[in-house]
Image (cartoon, helix red, strand yellow):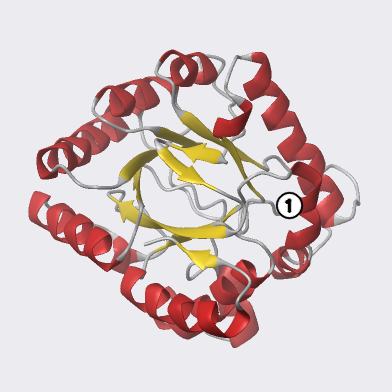
Amino acid sequence: MFKIGKTNLDLNEVVIMAVLNVSPESFFAGSVKSSDKEIEDFALKAVKYGAKIIDVGGMSTAPYKSTLVSQEVELERVKRAMSVLKNLSLEAEISIDTQRSKVMEIALNLGATIVNDVSGFSDPNSLKVAKDRSASVIAVAHGIPNEKIEPSEYVVKSIDEAINKALKAGIDEKSISIDPAIGFIRPVWIDSSEWDISILNNLSNIKSVFKKPLLVGVSRKSFIGKIAEEPDPAKRLAGTLAAEIISVQRGANIIRAHDVYELVQALKIAERLLKSFKLKL
């Protein structure tokens, strides 16, 4: 049994992580929540529909866009969102999607229980902050390979590096989940959609190496647009659901999603037909 925040999770179970996006720079403009009311409505509906985790992000991390904002701006956005969520007393874990230890610290102090850092803990203080507050962490594949390498081989090496950092910092091994970073790793020698498809085709193998909860975030990402010939992220829901269901079939335990209601419906059908996982609502 593993811990994602305070929630127990075994390697047969599937939970949904709802994306609460308060960064206007996001690649998917339709997901941005600009007011306290929008934040509140989204969070209440996400939990009502079945999300077990709300993932708060105050700065977009899309690697193909110029999205960097100052720490002060990110902090302001995150504090606002966390304050709204705290007042709702949700029956859900809150994760903080950031690369900055100061943002992690503020979010964890306001009730977050999970650190979701796509940089592989690049901030030297991030893991100390997580350890001091008994937070769970996501060990995410990161960086760009300098030479040609099989995608899943690189992802395994990168995740292993992040896990070792976390363990050396004193993070409980049962509080570490893994993420192969779909959409983030973009070597110049391979089309990014081909890289992502290769990783998705090897999810089962990647999970078998680590035997930890596997987080997959494919929602409306560019590989779906490339394959489906759909440049608008707002029109990628069908492709997203297909990729999410197949990811679960291949071992994903945590699905990071924009569209909770639609995903729950799809997973309920897949649960009955595949009979290989248990949807935790």
User: Residue 23, percent across and down?
Assistant: 31, 49
Residue at (62, 78) in percent of width and height: 226
Residue 58 at least partly seen: no
Side of 250 where 148 appears, left or right: right
Quadrant of the rendering where the N terminus is positioned: top right
User: Residue 3, percent across and down?
Assistant: 50, 37
Residue at (21, 37) in percent of width and height: 82
Residue 154 at least partly seen: yes
Between 176 and 59, the one lying in front of the other is 176
Residue 129: quadrant of the picture = top left
Residue at (13, 53) in percent of width and height: 40
Side of 142 where 208 appears, left or right: right
User: Residue 228, percent across and down?
Assistant: 59, 86
User: Residue 237, percent across and down?
Assistant: 44, 80
Under mark 1, the amino acid is: Lys
Query: How many numbered discs?
Result: 1
Residue 102: quadrant of the picture = top left
Up the image or down, 96 lies above or below 235; here it is: above
Dot 1 crowding, Cα within 10 Å, few <14, some 14–19, many 20+: many
Between 152 and 61, the one lying in front of the other is 152
Instruction: Indicate the secondary structure of the residue bearing disc 1.
Output: helix
Quadrant of the rendering where the C terminus is positioned: bottom left
Side of 56 where 64 appears, left or right: right
Up the image or down, 264 lies above or below 1; here it is: below
The residue tagged 1 is 207
